[in-house]
Image: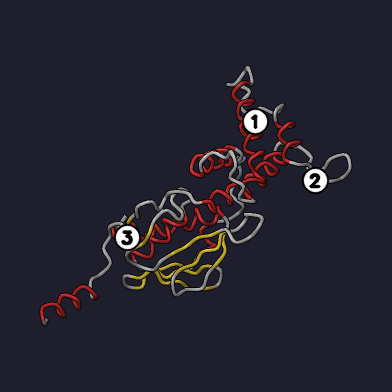
Amino acid sequence: MIDFIKKMLNKSERKPSFCSSFVELPGYGKPSVEDLKLEVVLFEKRVKDYASHQGISLQNSNSENKNVYGLLNELKDLNPYADIDTENQKWHNHIEELHELRKFRNKIIHIDHTDLPCVEDLYLRYKSANQLLIPFRLNGGCTVSNFKPIKWIGETLEILINGSIYHLDYADIDNLSIQLHPASRGAVYYKSGKQVVVKITDYDYTNLTVFIEDCPSFQITEDEAAILDDLILSAKGEKVYGA
């Protein structure tokens, strides 16, 4: 019994390791119906944002918002890959796929699964379409100064984010970095350090809300998320490896 207590005490006093602080769970990355719904809602916004980026008016002759069908028909004649897709065939195939996805919208939102492909297949199709419709954009003026002052206090990184001070150890930095990165966001389960969740909590998809265990939540944009990710990993690298 004494040996067991010693082992537990030693375990609780261990310093955070520099290795990865997360493990994947079976089936964790498999999309759910709710994941699919989120991509469907995002799809409509992506089409409108992309059309606006291409100079298409979002208003019709009656001063009402154009529907997705009308916007896709106008986009058909604006091939961004015209230099390499000289026959317009690939772009027209993309537009046909977007039309096909548009038709699934009501059934997915209202849980009418009649004649619908499986959730995973549809999720991947919407995900691919949404990535296709992201226009090139520049950083919206965010720099590393948005997250300063930043300094190490012993083995803990102190950083100012949106007026609040956060203290992160090595495992916390790993956990926050994983969630800030779009490709891995929400796809892992943490086994050490503070648990972190990043969600889109507004309807226009412009901000991310970051929830860190036992800390105040804060909102950032995707641009700011990328810079914060780079900043904390660089700080960790300098501390651990003296880079």
Q: Residue 152 placed where, x, y %?
A: 37, 69
Could you tell me how far apart the alpha carbons at marks 3 and 2 are, in whole angstroms? 47 Å
In the rendered image, which quarter is residue 206 located in? bottom right
Could you tell me how far apart the alpha carbons at marks 2 and 1 are, in whole angstroms? 20 Å
Total residue callouts:
3
Q: Earlier in the sequence, mark 3 or mark 2?
A: 3
Query: Label 2 near label 3: C-beta < 8 Å?
Result: no
Q: Earlier in the sequence, mark 3 or mark 1?
A: 3
Where residue 95 is drawn, which disc sits there?
Answer: 1
- Element type at mark 1: helix
Q: Is residue 2 above or below residue 134?
A: below
Q: Kindly identify the amino acid type of the residue bearing the numbered disc 3.
A: Ser
Q: Residue 1 placed where, x, y %?
A: 11, 81
Q: Is residue 81 left or right of residue 158?
A: right
Q: Is residue 103 above or below residue 184?
A: above
In the rendered image, the residue lying farthest to the bottom is 2
Q: Residue 24 placed where, x, y %?
A: 34, 54
Residue at the image point whose x is 50% and y is 55% from the top: 227
**Residue that mark 2 sits on:** 65
User: What is the crowding at mark 1: few (fewer than 14 residues within 10 Å), some, or many (at least 20)?
Assistant: some
Observer-side mark, 3 or 1, equals 1
